Amino acid sequence: MDHTPFGITVYRLATAVLAPLAPVLLRRRILRGKEHSERGDERLGFASYPRPSGTLVWVHGASVGECMAALPLIDALLAREGCHVLVTSGTVTSAKVMSERLPARALHQFVPIDTPSATARFLDHWMPQVGLFVDSDIWPNLVLGAKERDVHLALINARMSQRSFESWRWAPATAGALLSAFDVCLAQDEDIAARFRALGARDVCMIGSMKADAPLLPADPEKLAVLKQAIGSRPVLLAAQTHPGEEETILPAHDALRRTYPDLLTIIVPRHPERGPNIAMLCGTRNVRLRSRGEIPAADTAVYVADTMGELGLFYRLVPFAFVGGSLIPHGGQNPLEPAKLNCAVLAGPHTFNFASAYEAIFRAQGVGCVGSTGEISALVATLLAEPAKARALGGAAASGAESLSGAVAKTMAVVEKLLADARA
């Protein structure tokens, strides 16, 4: 008897019926810059490379953050004799970053759209022994199709917010069917582990976040030198990875600080670079420059908007502390481990549930860091600007807090070794 939940049955039928429309949708997304113009066939399951012989481990991450977190694990996998790695992701940006960062014997493909035909083509070509899904990017046809082909699956660096958990609880049979397809679930913290267990995941354990083991964000030395020379000895407030609604708190803090530090430079690095012109408009009469125009800070620049991709490592190396965005609004906060590992102290708002364990460890090590308003931001920043030695000490404490969370990659690798052994058996 077929025990497939009704929701999954409907989903698989609907995606099969709508599959002929997929090429049209992809062409529209290509025109909007949301898809790679020369690699659209990969999204339909057609491979761009032959399958390498021997063992193939498939690592899937939704976007840049998940793929970057998996890099140390990919290195460990490639250290195994005869092991190759296939990395899939769904964004143009992640494909560009992986083309620059993936080592030899690792291939990148765009993840197929989740239709039965596209996922079947993908799986039948690549035939991985093991599939590792990073975070929580779970597509029903892809996951269930892999399980039907006896691919050993693991959900690694697993994360689920309380909001997502509440949504899944409305479809417990569907959640259970999808999550039980994974042989093991490696959660980032105990709260997340409890959510996965409640939804029916098998063999759930907490091992921490692989992002604590991720490599340092890169930075071009020449670009860093140019920025340092342009800024000189000016005091700097860095607001990184900001989201809509946060600049309205950051900019008044900038104004308050300028009363004490008239040469203060505020650098805003938006999470989404296309927001650069809008942020410039929010600045009003404040003297602003945009990096996307090739501009660098001048002596009279009040706000510098770094609206480019892949340069966050530059700005975390420029300053002893930074405000990390996505935290003044209920987004859940961006990754605080990236600045902390570069000895950059972390300030953030109250909404940090995306990286709860990381923020907790870093704030505990620093002793300060949570700021929820314009007044709190300007007060703490003023203290750190007045006491550079304290700011540097907080940066060292942040690095120690981040280091205390490391080790997830080794634990994940041990689980993968068991999955590979089971696959051979």
Image (tube, grey):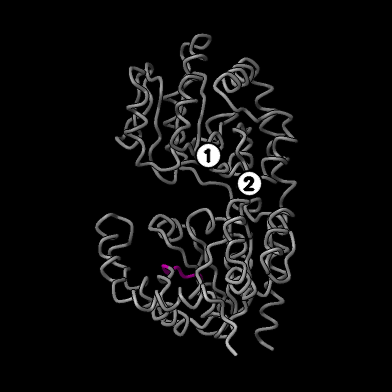
126 vs 92, left or right, is: right
Residue 171, percent from left and from top: 58, 66
Q: Which amino acid does label 2 sit on?
A: Phe
Q: The residue under label 1 is which amino acid type?
A: Gly
Residue with the mark numbered 2: 355
Q: In which quarter of the image is the N terminus?
A: bottom right
Secondary element under disc 1, as helix, strand or loop, is: loop
Q: Is mark 2 on a helix, strand or loop?
A: helix
Q: In which quarter of the image is residue 343?
A: top right
Does the segment drawn in magenta span residue 133? no
Which image quadrant: the C terminus?
A: bottom right
Q: Is residue 85 above or below residue 207?
A: below
Image height of 145 relative to 87, above or below: below
Specify the segment rendered in magenta.
106-110
Q: Say which residue appears at 48% left-offset and 58% top-offset.
A: 101
Q: Earlier in the sequence, mark 2 or mark 1?
A: 1
* Other-residue count near label 2 (Cα within 10 Å), few / some / many at <14 / 14–19 / ≥20: many
Residue count near mark 1 (Cα–Cα under 10 Å), binned few <14, some 14–19, many ≥20: many
Residue 112 lies, with reference to residue 365, above or below; the image says below
Viewer-proximal residue, 106 or 15? 15
Which residue is drawn at the image coordinates 75% and 46% (left, top)?
404
* Residue at point 73%, 58% (across, down): 194
In this rendering, position of residue 224 left or right of residue 187: left
How far apart marks 2 and 1 lie (CA) works out to 11 Å
Q: Nearer the viewer, residue 401 or 15?
A: 15
Q: Looking at the image, can residue 79 be seen?
A: no
Q: Taking the image as drawn, is residue 57 in sight?
A: yes
Identify which residue is drawn at 59% across, 21% down: 381
Q: Name the residue under label 1.
A: 326
